[in-house]
Structures are given as structure tokens and as C-alpha cells.
Image: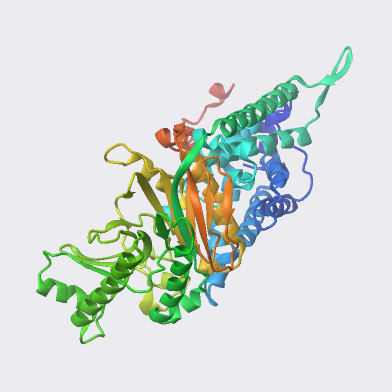
């Protein structure tokens, strides 16, 4: 559709929300301004107020009369700038990771021109007001991004407000996407004010345009209702003391973690455990970070035949002539270290560890959390369900071997972890714990599974997050990870305790308030008493209904547009008489 056709598609009227705007500045400058402004709203700058205005220049492009090439190229450039700045921490994972950083930013950047294309279709072709179309489509695309390749639910608009507690309490109804929708509505309203006059002429003189007055009232009403609900939820939250946890933050650089002997690494954790034991009263449980136990934990199915075990061991270690004996020794080593240590200190430990599970269906390699209790041989286990693409597995690597270059590993060590299948919770004493490993706490649907899949209907009392953010040492990734965690606590009205290597170990209550934390780049133990929250959550029961609704509305636009295209394609050619 040419710019002239777009201009003719919806004539200007007093309600300018669906009319085209004047050309204005070059689209690339508008989009770059939005990209830079939005990035500043997130950590490290954390200027959250900027989120409420940052997208105005981008939203103005929805009705721009500039050429389509300049509009889409400009919006792509703005998206690329935003993602390049936001995920720069990906480049810290490895000296050769700059290419992966560039590719990831490039892929994510196409969300912006995609958003512009869908919004122009809605506003110009179907005359849907921008204040409705833009927020719905933006949130629909955020929802999509949370699911593709297991999901990258980072940098939602709503995440910019992680410190504004009264504003983000609606997450227990709508999820974080509800806050995103509200911010997008305000940006769209400001774009309307920018592109059309707030005044209109009448016989009695100038007065505020009725459409603008109605929109302004609706936006103000949404803000008042949101904040009012937030103050109500915060003020009515009543917490009671729960378990006492010792959360270990080891601060081990990733290159040291991967290149140092297990014995050397274990010294650090022994030292941290000794600090845990010096606290008074002693903790009910000691929590290790993700994959912190430096020895591989080996589990063999009792029904596994020696011949099958040998086959799996040799397949796993093809260059080791003594593969079977090596894995038997690894099993003995791990069991002889962790279990006697727990028995000695007489305190249960939740341990992040890599588990090699030899069983009848074949070998599984899990990123796991193990709950080990004193004098109890039976383990409680959870295997991570949401694996990180290129960090823990390489999607489509068998079909496209070149994808290995996007990982921080040597070709022979490309990760091939197994997806966990059950949202297993741990029971210790009178409390139940769910454990989200690594980036699982950034994916709302992954965390919600712990609260909806309980076989006995009992939800977890405490949500734990064990993570290894050593890949991103000292960067804003640590701050962003903590900011996103806040929303998981509110969405499910559950306290969260985080034990993180290098990142930010913290305790968050059911209102999303960070009660205590350990500074990043610090080796320390955070001992906390968890505040239990007995409130229920609409979000837990119904999930991302808002995201689904916005996606359905967005998909509906495309379906109608495609249907109209086919209708034109098969319409009979009009004769001169018919044309008259």
C-alpha cells in the first residue's frame, strides 16, 4: 500500500485517532529515540518513568505518511538499538560470544517492524483507534516472545516498574503483561495528543475535543483503579514467619567454575556452609546455587542391566577405555561427599547439581535440584523443565550443525541437557518448596506450573530460585533477573528466596518487595526468615489470559486481512456497466 493510499484509507475527522499524521521527522530518528529511551527505563539506568513516554515516537510511526521502506527500516533500527543495548551481557559469556549477541539482537529487533505493520493494518485499514490497537498488539507480541524456543520473557514494558509496588500489584490478576498494557495505553494516548489537537472549535469558542476528553478520562481511570488496587493489596497483605533459610552466594567466576578442579571449588562451599552454621538460630535448610555442587551426581536405576549400563557409559564417554569404571567411581565419589556432609551438620540442604541418570530408557542429563535430608537416603529431585537455548541445549543442531558457533562451548562440549517433565515440589517438615532453576523464574508459565500441577492440590509455600549468573559477571543482567523475579512473587502471591552464584541473592515477599539481598560480586550467606503469604491469586488460577486475549485479537486482524485478500483475488472483473 503506497503512502498516498494509506492517506486516503481513512479521511481526517474530529477524531484523529485513526487518521494519518503529518510526515514529521525521519522515521529512523523517531524509532531510535524510542529504542534509546526504552533501554534507559530498564536496569542499569532504571529510569522507570521513561517507559511511560519512550514509545511515543515509535507509536507515531503507525500513522506516518512517510514511505513504507523508511517506516519499517526505521522501526527495525530502533528495535535493533534497544535489543543490542539491553542484552549486551550475552557477549560476556565467552570471548567469542559477540556474534551470538549480534544474532540474538537481530532476531529480536524484528518484533518492532512487525508491531508497526500489524498496528498500521489495524489503525489505517480497519480504523481501530491507536489507543486500542497499539497496546493490544504490543502485549500480544510480548506474549508470543515468552513462548518461542521455550520463551524469552525478558524486558516486558511492565518490568520497568519493578520498584513501584502499588502499580504492579495487578500482576496477581493479569500477570506482568497487565502492567505492560497500561504503559502502552499511556504511550498511545500521548501519541494521540501529539499528532492531533486537543482543542476543537465550536460556536461558543475553543473547547477540549470530546474524543480526547473521553480517552483522557479512560486512561486516568485505568491508572487510578490500578494504583488503588495496588495500595489495597499491599495494605491487606498479612505475613507470618515461615522457615529460616541460609542462602549461599558463592561468587565464582564462570571460567574458574569450568576450569578449576572440583576439590578446589568445594573448598568455597565448605567455607560458606561453616558460615551458615554460625548463624543463630540455625537455619531449617541451606540452599546452594544452581549446579554449585562441583561433582557430577550419578544415579543408576536398580533395574538397569550391567550390559545396558556399559552401553550408556561408553556412549557418554567414547574416548575413555574405562568408561564403566569411571562412572561407577563418580557415583561413589558424589554419594560419599554430599550425604555424609549433610549427616554431619544435621541440616537439610537443597543442592544445585548436574545429574547423570542412567535408566532403562537411556541416559538423561538433568540440571537438577536435590533435597538431601540428614539420615534419609531417599532424595527429593526436581529436573529443570525450561532449558535455555544455546546455553543448555542447541535447538535444531542435528539439522543445522553450524548452530554450535552460537554457543560458548567447544564443539565437543556442546550442551545436550534433558528437559524435565514434572513440576516437582519438595516437602520438608510442614513446608512445601518449589524450585525454579536459573532463568525459569523469568518465564511466568514455567513458574505457574508449580502452583497448578500439585497432585494433592496443595500449592508451594515458598518459591526458591537457584541460579548461576556467573556467565554475566557484574553486568545489568543480575539486576534485570532480580527485577523480573519480583513479578513471579506477586503473580502467585508467594515469597521467593534466591540463592545465586555471582548474581543477587535475595528474599522477596508476596507483595514483590525485596526485603534483603546480597550485593553482586560478593561471596556471602544471606540468612532469612521467610514471610509466608496465604493469599490466593487470580493469575495462578487463570494464567496469562490477558496475553492470550491480546494475541487472539492480533491474530484476528491477520485472518481478516488474509480473507479480504483472497476475496479480492477471486472477485469477478467488473464490466463497464457494472462499474457504473
Count of all numbered marks drawn on residues in the image: 0
Q: Position of residue 94 (x, y in %)?
A: 52, 75
- Left/right placement of residue 310 relative to residue 16 reads left
Q: Residue at x 48, y 39 (%)?
A: 240
Quarter of the view holding residue 387: bottom left
Q: Residue at x 56, y 34 (%)?
A: 170
Q: Which of the pair 422/109 is nearer the observer?
A: 422
Q: Which of the pair 573/257 is nearer the observer?
A: 257
Q: Position of residue 142 (x, y in %)?
A: 53, 45
- Left/right placement of residue 296 relative to residue 403 reads left
- Left/right placement of residue 51 relative to residue 319 reads right
Q: Which of the pair 486/131 is nearer the observer?
A: 486
Considering every residue shown, the one lying at the far front of the view is 280
Q: Position of residue 117 (x, y in %)?
A: 59, 44
Considering every residue shown, the one lying at the far right of the view is 205
Q: Is residue 396 visible?
A: no
Q: Residue at x 42, y 33 (%)?
A: 542
> Is residue 214 positioned above or below 539 on the image?
above
> Is residue 370 positioned above or below 197 on the image?
below
Quarter of the view holding residue 220: top right
- Left/right placement of residue 386 relative to residue 37 reads left
Q: Is residue 250 visible?
A: yes
Q: Position of residue 59 (x, y in %)?
A: 68, 41
- Quadrant of the image for the C terminus? top right
Q: Which of the pair 473/101 is nearer the observer?
A: 473
- Quadrant of the image for the N terminus? top right
Amino acid at each position: 500500500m503506497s503512502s498516498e493510499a494509506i492517506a486516503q484509507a481513512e479521511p481526517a475527522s474530529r477524531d484523529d485517532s485513526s487518521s494519518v499524521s503529518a510526515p514529521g521527522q525521519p522515521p529512523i530518528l523517531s524509532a531510535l529515540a524510542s529504542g534509546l529511551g526504552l533501554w534507559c527505563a530498564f536496569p542499569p539506568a532504571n529510569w522507570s518513568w521513561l517507559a511511560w513516554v519512550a514509545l511515543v515516537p515509535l507509536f507515531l510511526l503507525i500513522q506516518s505518511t512517510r514511505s513504507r521502506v523508511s517506516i519499517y527500516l526505521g522501526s527495525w533500527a530502533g528495535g535493533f538499538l534497544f535489543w543490542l543495548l539491553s542484552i549486551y551481557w550475552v557477549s560476556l559469556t565467552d570471548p567469542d560470544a559477540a556474534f551470538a549477541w549480534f544474532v540474538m539482537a537481530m532476531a529480536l529487533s524484528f518484533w518492532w517492524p512487525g508491531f508497526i505493520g500489524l498496528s498500521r493494518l489495524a489503525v489505517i485499514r480497519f480504523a481501530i483507534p491507536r489507543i486500542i490497537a497499539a497496546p493490544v498488539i504490543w502485549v500480544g507480541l510480548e506474549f508470543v516472545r515468552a513462548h518461542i524456543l521455550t520463551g524469552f520473557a525478558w524486558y516486558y514494558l511492565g518490568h520497568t516498574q519493578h520498584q513501584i509496588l502499588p502499580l504492579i500489584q495487578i500482576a496477581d490478576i493479569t500477570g506482568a503483561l497487565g502492567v505492560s498494557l497500561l504503559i502502552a495505553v499511556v504511550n498511545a494516548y500521548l501519541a494521540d495528543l501529539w499528532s492531533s489537537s486537543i482543542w476543537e472549535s465550536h460556536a461558543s469558542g475553543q473547547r477540549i475535543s470530546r474524543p480526547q476528553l473521553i480517552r483522557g478520562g479512560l486512561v486516568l481511570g485505568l491508572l487510578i483503579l490500578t494504583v488503588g488496587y495496588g495500595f489495597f493489596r499491599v495494605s491487606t497483605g498479612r505475613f507470618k514467619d515461615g522457615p529460616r533459610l541460609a542462602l549461599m552466594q558463592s561468587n565464582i567466576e564462570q571460567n574458574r567454575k569450568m576450569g578449576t578442579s572440583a576439590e578446589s571449588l568445594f573448598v568455597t562451599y565448605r567455607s560458606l556452609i561453616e558460615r551458615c552454621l554460625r548463624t543463630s538460630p540455625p537455619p531449617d535448610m541451606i540452599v546452594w546455587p544452581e549446579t554449585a555442587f562441583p561433582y557430577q551426581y550419578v544415579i543408576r536405576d536398580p533395574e538397569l542391566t550391567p550390559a545396558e549400563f556399559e552401553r550408556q557409559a561408553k556412549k557418554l564417554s567414547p574416548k575413555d577405555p574405562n568408561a564403566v569404571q569411571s562412572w561407577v567411581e563418580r557415583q561413589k565419589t558424589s554419594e560419599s561427599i554430599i550425604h555424609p556432609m549433610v549427616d554431619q551438620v544435621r541440616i537439610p540442604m537443597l543442592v544445585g547439581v548436574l545429574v547423570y541418570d542412567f535408566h532403562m530408557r537411556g541416559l538423561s542429563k538433568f540440571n537438577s535440584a536435590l533435597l538431601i535430608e540428614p539420615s534419609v537416603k531417599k532424595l527429593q529431585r526436581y529436573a529443570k523443565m525450561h532449558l535455555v537455548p544455546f546455553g543448555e541445549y542447541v535447538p535444531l543442531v542435528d539439522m543445522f550443525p553450524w548452530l554450535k558457533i552460537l554457543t560458548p562451548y567447544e564443539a565437543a562440549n556442546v550442551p545436550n541437557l534433558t528437559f524435565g517433565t514434572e513440576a516437582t515440589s519438595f516437602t520438608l517438615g510442614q513446608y512445601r518448596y518449589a524450585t525454579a532453576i536459573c532463568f525459569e523464574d523469568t518465564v511466568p508459565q514455567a513458574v505457574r506450573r508449580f502452583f497448578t500441577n500439585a497432585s494433592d492440590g496443595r500449592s508451594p509455600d515458598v518459591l526458591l530460585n537457584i541460579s548461576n549468573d556467573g556467565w554475566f559477571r557484574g553486568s545489568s543482567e543480575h539486576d534485570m533477573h532480580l527485577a523480573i523475579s519480583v513479578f513471579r512473587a506477586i503473580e502467585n502471591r508467594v515469597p521467593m528466596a534466591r540463592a545465586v552464584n555471582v548474581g543477587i541473592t535475595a528474599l522477596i515477599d508476596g507483595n514483590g518487595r525485596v526485603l534483603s539481598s546480597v550485593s553482586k560480586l560478593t561471596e556471602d550467606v544471606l540468612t532469612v526468615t521467610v514471610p509466608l503469604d496465604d493469599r490466593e491469586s487470580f493469575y495462578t488460577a487463570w494464567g496469562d489470559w490477558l496475553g492470550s486475549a491480546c494475541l487472539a485479537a492480533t491474530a484476528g486482524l491477520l485472518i481478516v486481512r488474509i480473507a479480504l485478500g483472497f476475496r479480492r483475488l477471486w472477485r469477478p472483473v467488473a464490466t463497464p456497466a457494472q462499474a457504473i
